[in-house]
Each structure stands twice: as C-alpha cells, then as structure tokens.
C-alpha cells in the first residue's frame, strides 16, 4: 500500500512540475527580454576583443567588497568587464567604483534570472562585435577568488576547446556549471551561439532556467560540433578519493581519533558518502560535494550556497576556513565577513 501511495505521489509531483514549467514558458514569452533601464557610462560602452559579462543581484543594490577584487583581476587580465545587475538599482558609491574597473555598467529589472541578464547584455552590446575574440559569462554566486585568478585565465586555450567551464556536472544531464563559462572565437561566431541566446526567454522559474538554459546551453554547443571542456574535470576530482585515502580513515588509530574529533568524524563520513555515490554512479555536484578537492587542486572559489545554506548537507564543510588558512595560506576573514552579512539577512 505504501509503495502504491508513493508512486501516486510521485506522479502527482511530476505532473505539477510539468504544469509549472509549461506556465513558466508561456509567461516568459509574454515578457520582453529587454529589461535594461540604465547604461553607463553615458558616452557609451567601449569594448576590447575579450569581454566578461558579470551578472550580479542583490535586493538592496549593494555590491560585496570581494566582488571588486574579482572584477579587478578580470580587468587586469586585459578583459573588458561589463557589470550587469538584475537588482534594478545600484548604490551610487558602488557604481562609481565599478566604473573605474569596468568598461560599463548595465542596470536591469530582475526578470529572467542570470540567463535573462546575459542575453540582455549580449543584445544590448550587440555581441559579438567584429573584433570580439572571447565572451565570458560569470555571476556572483561564488566567494573568492581565494588565489590569483591569472593562473586560471591563462589555462583557457581555445586551440584545445571552443567552450570552457571551470567545473562540469552530470546531474540531470551533462553540462558546464554556468557560474563561469568562456566562449572562444569559433564558438561566438557559430550560428548555434546566436540561436541559443536569441531563444532565451525571461521565464519566472529557476527550474525552467536550469533545465532549458544551464543544461541546454552545453547541449546546444555540443550538438553544433563545438568542443566543450573544463579546467577541473569531474573524473580528475573523483579519482582523488582513492582507496589509500579511505584506508587512512578506516584504520584503528584514525577511527579512534575520529570518535574524539568531530571534524575528523565528519570528514570520514563524507569520504564514505562520496565513495558510495561514485560506486553507484550517482552524480555529485563538484562545487559542493568536492569543494575540498577543488581547492587543493588550484581552484579559486568556494560556492556561496555551500557556506550559506549547504543544501545537500555536505558533512565536511565545517573546516573550510581552516583549509584556507592552514593549507592554502589564505585569510578567510573577507569571506567570513560576507557570510555573516548574509546570515543576518542583509544580503541575498
């Protein structure tokens, strides 16, 4: 009886989700994708051949201090950064600072989530322009960079791939995780690139956007014959969870220590969960489940969602600050300050 009720409930849930997505699609087509209300500087946005579309949202129009560091490092790499905020407003002091770092600032209404903002930016700036060599889409969903970004940017080799992400996921379907995706010369001039962005609609559903656009973008590029790659491959990360590593947590001394040290215990439990998921071929989310392996492999970020909400209940994230401070030699204080602000409800 319980199994029958469960199947009925799953069927009802699936039907409800399908209706929600269908309604979101209809509503998205009724809205204009063009929601930019302010473009600065007033004299016009002048772009170089390499462009970063930096997507931001904060209900109060504030810009976290760490984002200025992130943007500065992108600009120092020779890229023209265009700051796109979905907040509908921006603090005057923040705007003034941004205009010293960025080629321009676009303020738009909070319609269409990140992909709506990126589409609006691409069309407002008429990208790609004749001399455009690269377009990178990024958002503010990360803390960091916790190490200089230059090393990461130098690895974007368009002789090896046309589209680069930092991390990849097999959850639902293979895709590059969209918080940082770089398109090279061949990709931005492929008909599939323009076609994809033209069909992005401002649907009022995060699930719709993830399925149709975050996952759909990667699939569209692959179907067009473009080469897609990531700097921190999933397989490379999972191979770090070795039998020897597990054995170190299962021997007698380690097990006894784990019982006395909560951090060791949670680390031990997390390794067991990861290995079980890998054995059952259950996809992991690299930026949450494998956060430690990423950092130890040179990755420059920590996802905000992981530290703020930990939605997938990652067991071993409690010592993230110690990993930064003691292993990487990085001061975690700026992240801690941002995190406290968020937990007080002063930021999203």
Image (cartoon, rainbow, N blue to C red):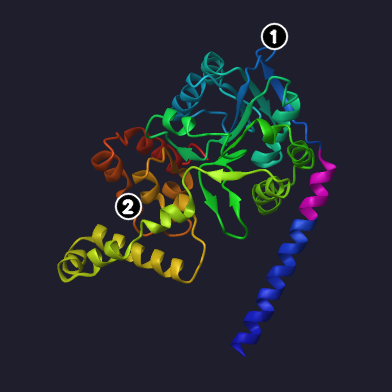
Q: CA distance from mark 2 to mark 1?
A: 48 Å
Q: Is residue 28 magenta?
A: yes
The correct choice, above or below, for 6 with respect to 73 in the image is below
Q: Residues within 10 Å of mark 2 (few under 14, many from 20)?
A: some
The correct choice, above or below, for 17 with respect to 161 in the image is below
N-terminal label among 2 and 1: 1
The spot of residue 101 in percent (x, y) is: 52, 17
| Nearer to the camera, 79 or 139 | 79
Task: Give the structural element (helix, strand or loop) at label 1.
Answer: loop
- The residue lying at 65 percent from left, 83 percent from top is 5
Magenta span: 23-31
Residue that extends furthest to the front in the rendered view of this protein: 159
- Quarter where residue 87 is shown: top right
Task: Give the structural element (helix, strand or loop) at label 2.
Answer: helix
| Nearer to the camera, 122 or 231 | 231
The spot of residue 205 in percent (x, y) is: 70, 50
Q: Which mark is residue 18?
A: none
Which residue is identified by label 1? 43
Which residue is identified by label 2? 318
Mark yes or no: residue 56 visible. Answer: no
Left/right placement of residue 263 relative to residue 341 reads left
Left/right placement of residue 73 relative to residue 181 reads left
The spot of residue 189 in percent (x, y) is: 73, 32
Q: Is residue 64 magenta?
A: no
Please state the total of marks drawn on the protein image: 2
Left/right placement of residue 145 relative to residue 39 reads left
- The residue lying at 48 percent from left, 49 percent from top is 233
Mark yes or no: residue 138 visible. Answer: yes
Q: Main secondary structure of the magenta part?
A: helix
The spot of residue 57 in percent (x, y) is: 58, 35
Quick check: marks 2 and 1 in contact, CB under 8 Å?
A: no
- Quarter where residue 187 is shown: top right
């Amino acid at each position: 009886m319980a199994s029958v009720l469960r199947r009925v409930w799953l069927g009802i849930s699936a039907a409800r989700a399908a209706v929600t997505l269908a309604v979101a699609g209809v509503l998205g087509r009724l809205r204009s994708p063009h929601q930019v209300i302010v473009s600065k500087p007033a004299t016009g946005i002048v772009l170089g051949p390499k462009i970063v579309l930096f997507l931001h949202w904060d209900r109060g129009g504030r810009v976290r201090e760490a984002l200025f560091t992130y943007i500065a490092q992108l600009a120092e790499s020779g890229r023209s950064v265009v700051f796109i905020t979905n907040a509908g407003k921006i603090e005057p002091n923040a705007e003034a600072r941004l205009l010293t770092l960025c080629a321009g600032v676009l303020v738009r209404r909070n319609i269409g989530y990140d992909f709506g903002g990126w589409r609006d930016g691409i069309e407002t700036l008429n990208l790609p322009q004749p001399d455009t060599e690269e377009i990178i889409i990024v958002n503010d969903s990360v803390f960091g960079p916790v190490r200089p970004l230059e090393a990461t940017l130098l690895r974007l080799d368009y002789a090896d791939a046309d589209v680069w992400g930092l991390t990849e996921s097999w959850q639902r379907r293979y895709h590059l995780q969209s918080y940082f995706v770089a398109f090279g010369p061949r990709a931005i001039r492929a008909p599939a690139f323009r076609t994809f962005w033209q069909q992005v609609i401002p649907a009022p559903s995060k699930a719709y956007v993830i399925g149709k656009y975050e996952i759909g973008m990667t699939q569209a590029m692959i179907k067009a014959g473009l080469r897609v790659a990531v700097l921190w491959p999933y397989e490379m990360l999972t191979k770090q969870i070795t039998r020897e590593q597990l054995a170190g947590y299962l021997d007698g001394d380690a097990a006894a220590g784990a019982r006395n040290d909560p951090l060791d215990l949670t680390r031990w439990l997390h390794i067991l969960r990861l290995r079980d998921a890998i054995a059952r071929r259950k996809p992991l989310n690299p930026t949450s489940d494998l956060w430690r392996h990423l950092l130890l492999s040179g990755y420059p970020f920590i996802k905000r969602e992981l530290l703020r909400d930990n939605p997938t209940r990652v067991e071993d994230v409690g010592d993230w600050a110690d990993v930064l401070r003691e292993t990487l030699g990085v001061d975690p204080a700026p992240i801690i300050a941002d995190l406290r602000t968020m937990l007080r409800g002063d930021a999203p």
